[in-house]
Amino acid sequence: GAGVSQSPSNKVTEKGKDVELRCDPISGHTALYWYRQSLGQGLEFLIYFQGNSAPDKSGLPSDRFSAERTGGSVSTLTIQRTQQEDSAVYLCASSLSHTENTEAFFGQGTRLTVV
Amino acid sequence: AQSVTQLGSHVSVSEGALVLLRCNYSSSVPPYLFWYVQYPNQGLQLLLKYTSAATLVKGINGFEAEFKKSETSFHLTKPSAHMSDAAEYFCAVIHGSSNTGKLIFGQGTTLQVKP
């Protein structure tokens, strides 16, 4: 596709349920990032993929959060046993490489509401 | 560790007036600095970036920013505000020796443009 695509755009889930958020990066982009945007915390880095491996997952807030990337393309962020504090907008970004002067392109995000 | 501080969570200007959004950074090595804009219910869009080539950086939509090492600042300006500039603006930094390209964001500044 022309840009980074995220699905679903909105997700409402009950506390304790698991959710999966999907990111389709721009074709050919080897670097992929997940960020979380919430009212109290602003924009936070979660995890970075280079190809299918995740050399930096330092931003994942707890072991309930995990992510994978397959085929060097699609990535899935999974949150197990969701809690109300997980409510946020989850943004995915991709770039041609991880170097500092490479522009990161962002998707429109998935708004997660845990009730 | 690198960080970014945006002074003023909300800025209000009249249409046609100067826009000034402030950003200060802390980094022990030369940083790479970015300004992103987020329109309602959309992802982030890159306005401009500083990667040490020139201290005055021109971006899209008439915005520019000047890197001032002595002041550790990277303020965003636009000579004349337009109604369509109303959005949230984020300053971000990548550590100069980063090998991941992950962005560290400021808390954001909401720009209101009054007619």
Image: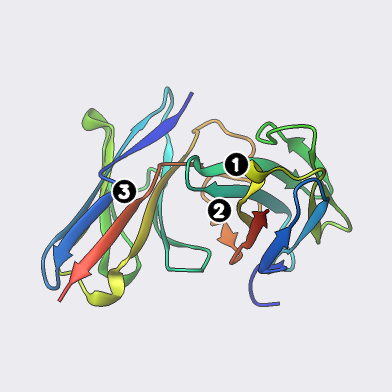
Q: Is residue B96 above or below residue A91?
A: above
Whether residue A40 is visible here, answered yes or no, is yes
Chain identifier of the residue bearing label 2 in the image: A
- Quarter of the figure with the C terminus of chain B: bottom left
> Label 3 amino acid?
Ala
Give me the chain letter of mark 3.
Answer: B
Label 2 or label 1, whichever comes before in sequence order: 1
Residue B103 appears in view: no
Q: Is residue B71 left or right of residue B34?
A: left
Residue A102 image label: 2
* Inter-mark Cα distance, 2 to 1: 17 Å
Element class at badge 3: loop
Q: Mark 3 = which residue?
A: B54
Residue B60 coordinates in the image, percent (x, y): 35, 68
Q: Which residue is mark 1?
A: A45
Residue B31, compared with residue B8, is above or below; it is above
Looking at the image, which is closer to me, B8 or A72?
Answer: B8
Query: Which quadrant holds residue A29?
Result: bottom right
The residue at the point 63 percent across, 35 percent down is: B99
Of the two numbered discs 3 and 2 in the rendering, the one whose residue sits closer to the viewer: 2
Q: Residue at x 31, y 48 (%)?
A: B54
| Colour scheme of the rendered structure | rainbow
Report if the CB atoms under discs 2 and 1 are less than 8 Å apart: no
* Left-right relation of B22 to A72: left
